[in-house]
Amino acid sequence: MANSTTTVLDVDWAVDWLRRSAAVVAENRMALIELDRAIGDGDHGENMDRGFSAIVEKLDSEPPATPGAAFKLAAMTLMSKVGGAAGPLYGTAFLRAATAVGDVPELDSAAVAAALAAARDGVVARGKAEVGDKTMIDAWTPAVDAAAEAAAAGSRPAAVLSAAATAAEAGAASTDPLVAHKGRASYLGERAIGHRDPGAVSSALILRAAALAAGADA
Ligand code: ADP
Ligand code: MG
């Protein structure tokens, strides 16, 4: 298993990441539903739980051979099983990450940071949100920046992902005072103020799962 001094992450990390994501999404299903109830239609927790449960089933039946194959499996499953905005957005994120890493067996810190950047770029290409629009991009963009900085400073993958997760958590919290400019919450105008964006919260949970799978401290 990966630990904080591991220099490269392999398919076992990628699979562990997806399994931990499924667990944390299941654990936070009601919390995500409640966040989405406040500023959306209340289905985000259910959407994410359905998608990640399906990913775990696929991992059991068709174990991937590389990190890229694991990301592709996640992408395909999320796109086919999850409706709403988040399914195609997360699906695109994982698909772009898969393309970014290709079929190499191991990812170093730079490759991990590049995969996160590609994932974020995919969400932007698909959803056209910018930082401050009160979406998952408010978690992803600071995470990508923190990961790039940590990788450039020579940090190990666990520290790169830990920096990304911490930045994503702060980014999710930063959505509280915002009016939404994308997605269902944008219909609410000022009534969205004071509520945290559910997709930003699920993104932070998933990025923290990536760090824990890489051996970072909780
Ligand atoms: P839906 O809004 O269709 O019900 P979900 O509830 O599953 O789908 O997901 C809502 C989340 O999707 C939001 O909290 C937000 O983070 C994200 N989202 C919605 N639209 C966009 C967009 N255009 N770009 C980025 N993220 C978006
Ligand atoms: Mg919703």
Image: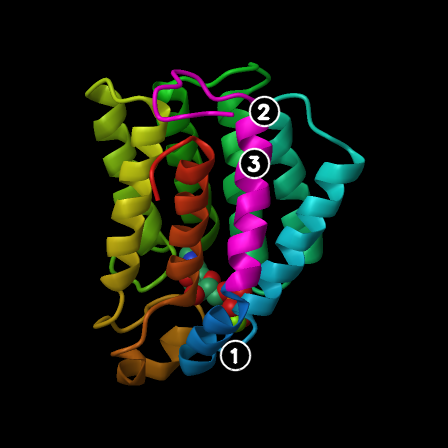
Residue 17 image position (x, y, % from top left) = 52, 38
Q: Is residue 184 visible?
A: no
Q: How many marks?
A: 3
Q: Residue at x 46, y 19 (%)?
A: 107
User: Looking at the image, is mark 2 or mark 3 earlier in the sequence?
Assistant: 2
Give the residue type at disc 2: Val
Q: Residues within 10 Å of mark 1 (few under 14, many from 20)?
A: some
Q: Is residue 23 covered in magenta?
A: yes
Residue 102 image position (x, y, % from top left) = 56, 20
Task: Say left or right for 66 vs 96.
Answer: right
Find the magenta span and give its range: 1-27
Q: Nearer the viewer, residue 138 or 196?
A: 196
Question: Which SS class for mark 2?
Answer: helix
Q: Which residue is mark 2?
A: 11
Q: Nearer the viewer, residue 175 or 56?
A: 56
Q: Which residue is mark 1?
A: 41
Q: Nearer the viewer, residue 25 or 131?
A: 25
Task: Say left or right for 88 vs 166.
Answer: right
- Give residue 68's mark: none
In the rendered image, the vertical position of residue 137 relative to residue 26, given as above or below:
above
Give the residue type at disc 3: Asp
Question: Which SS class for mark 1?
Answer: loop
Which mark is in front, 2 or 3? 3
Q: Quadrant of residue 181?
A: bottom left
